[in-house]
Image (cartoon, grey):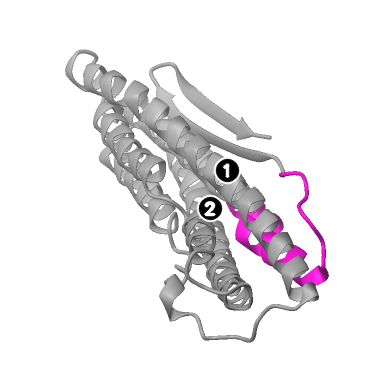
Amino acid sequence: MTTRAVGWMVAAILALGGTARAQGVPPPADSATPAPEASAGQTADLARLEALLQSHASEARTARLTFGSVAVATGLAAVPVGIVAQTSWNQQYGIGLWVTGALLLGFGTVSLVVETPLEVLDQQFRAAARTLSPADQLAFGVGGLASVASGARTSRLVGAISGLVLAGVFFGVAIGEWVAAGNAVGSDKNDKQANGATALVLGGLFCGGATAQLVLPSPAETAYAAYLSGQGTQRNGVQLSAGFVPLRGGGMVGVGGAF
């Protein structure tokens, strides 16, 4: 793998991390606008909203911890293998491997310790019960959930579009490298073929991730849509995540999921 392939891998990981936390943060509880005392209907809505927030915040937390765990585990494996590949095997892909592993460790650690906006809102909503009337708490919760859902939807669409663009770039690079390999010989031909394979894998990962982002709404969007439709809590959906790093003579795949 040449230094160009190293650049592709680093750019890919940075692009993934750039959209990881781009969701709206709910307003603080003390900014809620005073509202009339709760009626019987508002009390029922308050209980339903509380259940929805708790259920979907738990789903968001599970997905966050799953991604963080897989990223950290993949990074812990990639860093030492990359160092060995660079220093002992004299392979150029070693530096790309340990740099990618270090980035995964960083993003995974952030995902493990930084809560999502939906989790923060759930905590603020429950804390607001001690300082706000039921009507004010309901107004705060609905407004906060609408804000978080809007931010999550924007982040999801931007991430999906960015992923599709990057997938197209990587697929184009793969085709270009394989075409160039047809006119090369020896180690240069092998390098170009390896670069093409790496670009193809990265393009496939971005394409799959972007498709999932387009099709699957975030927990915040699901919770807000359920509240507006009058529905209660529903069973959490399947949350899957995966990672791939190329190794000498093959590759390593990490897969995680929450049900």
- Where residue 90 sits, quadrant-wise, is top left
Q: In the image, what residue occupies the spot 47% across and 70% down?
A: 131
**Is mark 1 in CB contact (under 8 Å) with mark 2?**
yes
Where the N terminus falls, by quadrant?
A: top left
Residue 230 sits inside the magenta stretch: yes
Does residue 150 lie above or below 8 as drawn? below
Where the C terminus falls, by quadrant?
A: top right
Dot 1 crowding, Cα within 10 Å, few <14, some 14–19, many 20+: some
Give how far across and how far down residue 190 sits, in percent.
39, 27
How many marks do you count on the picture?
2
Q: Which residues are magenta?
A: 210-236
Give how far across and how far down residue 154 sits, in percent.
55, 70
Does residue 125 lie above or below 185 as drawn? below
Q: Which mark is residue 61?
A: none
Which secondary structure, mark 2? helix
- Amino acid of disc 2: Ala
Of residue 135 and residue 75, the one placed in the foreground of this image is 135
Does residue 14 lie above or below 202 as drawn? below
Which secondary structure, mark 1? helix
Task: Name the side, left or right, on which 203 lies relative to 229.
Answer: left
Give how far across and how far down residue 231 sits, in percent.
82, 62
Residue 17 sits inside the magenta stretch: no
- Where residue 20 sits, quadrant-wise, is bottom left
Q: Name the residue beneath numbered marker 1.
A: 204
Q: In the image, what residue occupies the spot 52% across and 65% down?
A: 155
* Magenta region, main secondary structure: helix
- Amino acid of disc 1: Gly
Task: Name the side, left or right, on which 39 lies relative to 181.
Answer: right
Label 1, label 2: how far apart the Cα atoms are: 7 Å
Q: Is residue 182 visible?
A: no
Task: Name the side, left or right, on which 121 lies relative to 82.
Answer: right
Q: Name the residue beneath numbered marker 2.
A: 167
